[in-house]
Image (tube, rainbow, N blue to C red):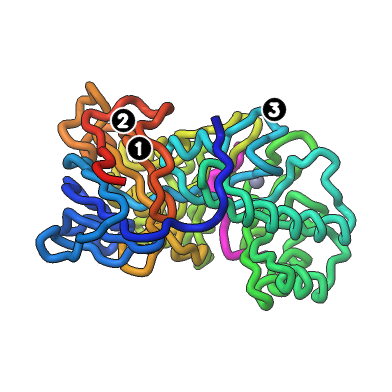
Amino acid sequence: MAVETSAGPAKGKLVIRNIGLLLSGDLDKPILDADTIVATDGKIEAVGRQGDLDTDQAATVIDAHDVCVAPGLIDSHVHPVFGDWTPRQSQLNWIDSFLHGGVTTMVSAGEVHLPGRPKDIVGLKALAVTAQRSFSAFRPGGVKVMAGAPVIEKGMEEHDFKELAEAGVSLLGEVGLGSVKAGEEAARMVAWARKYGIQSTIHTGGPSIPGSGLIDKDVVLEADADIIGHINGGHTALPEGHVCELCERSTRAIELVHNGNERVAIAALKAARDLKQLHRVILGTDSPAGSGVQPLGILRMISLLSGLGGLSAEAAICLATGNTARIRNLAGGLIEPGRSADFVLMDRAQHTAGRTILESIALGDIPGIGMVVIDGIVRTGRSRNTPPAERLPEVVTA
Ligand SMILES: [Zn+2]
């Protein structure tokens, strides 16, 4: 059952101790030499060895029982509408189900599935402001949904972007899903958005469903949006050579999604690694979509990129956490003081061939989630969606 949760963080101190493996989310140092996290009022305060930290007077103590703790996963590309409902596949509680896949923050790439979505300028601005307000005040299962991402249409002018920014809108929906499909026109609007602090994402590749269109590499390069959205297509990818060219010629973020071409996702990962620019790679599901909703989509991307892409499991997790947090200016995503206390506690799944959680991911399996914490509050115990974890964390005082 989905729980309606207000946006406020925990009050008081949270201690997580006996952490067996602490993953930072930071590609430069993915594994931390620490077994304890202390958080206060929903923010990480200290990370280290239990004996070196002040763990007294905690309101909540979690005994990790030697499992792995990582930053909460971030889905860089979702299409929410309102509440915990998607008309795309007539599903309720899909966001709460993602929580059970370790996702603590998701970023809207446009509320495009709203039945009768307004395409006139005043209407699309009103929808963006409404979605931003709605998801600021409502967190299904506690998940932070960064929404209010207008799909740009022909005729928008600089003042429209200024008004959106002043109203609290900080994202553009996928460029190319509306009537603006030419590179020069998109570039002009993307630049206006950037001028007012609104981050942009472009649809890359063939049309997703009847009625949407092709965005090729030349349009992506000319538009110069901040995020090369689903560079591996959503679903249909550009030719592999064009995708690699985008990685080389653009400096923008490289987004790989579950709802895309897996072969091309691996090719883009390898191109980014050869360029020594893995910090540009971020992960999303691009769901809900025609392929459904994927509560375990981010975990599956991590296992795909590690199992078939040859990336270490700890590095693959950084793509879904610290990389995305830095590129999208989010408060979580990294285990370091000052960041949101958003964590996923997980262990190797029962009966995986991998001897450790990292080895199991490198073999292509997904881990078992035992607990998810958002803003210092325990949001769920053992996941109802992942395979069962070998060992489980436990709240020992509350
Ligand atoms: Zn798209």
Measured from the top left, where is residue 203 in percent x and y? 65, 51
What secondary structure is found at the residue carrying circle 2?
loop
Q: Magenta stretch: residue 124 in it?
A: no
- Res 261 seen here: no
Judging depth in this view, the residue of 328 and 126 nearest the camera is: 126
Residue holding disc 1: 303
Q: Give the residue at the far left of this rendering.
A: 51
Residue holding disc 2: 365
Distance in Å between CA atoms under marks 3 and 2: 29 Å
- Mark 1 / mark 3, whichever is N-terminal: 3
Residue holding disc 3: 90
Judging depth in this view, the residue of 386 and 342 nearest the camera is: 342
Which residue range is magenta in the image? 223-236
Q: Are marks 1 and 2 in contact (CB under 8 Å)?
A: yes
In the rendered view, does 11 fall on the left or right side of 286? Answer: left
Judging depth in this view, the residue of 180 and 239 nearest the camera is: 180
Q: Which residue is drawn at 62% across and 58% down?
A: 201
Figure quadrant of the N terminus? top right
The rendered magenta stretch, by its main secondary structure, is classed as: loop
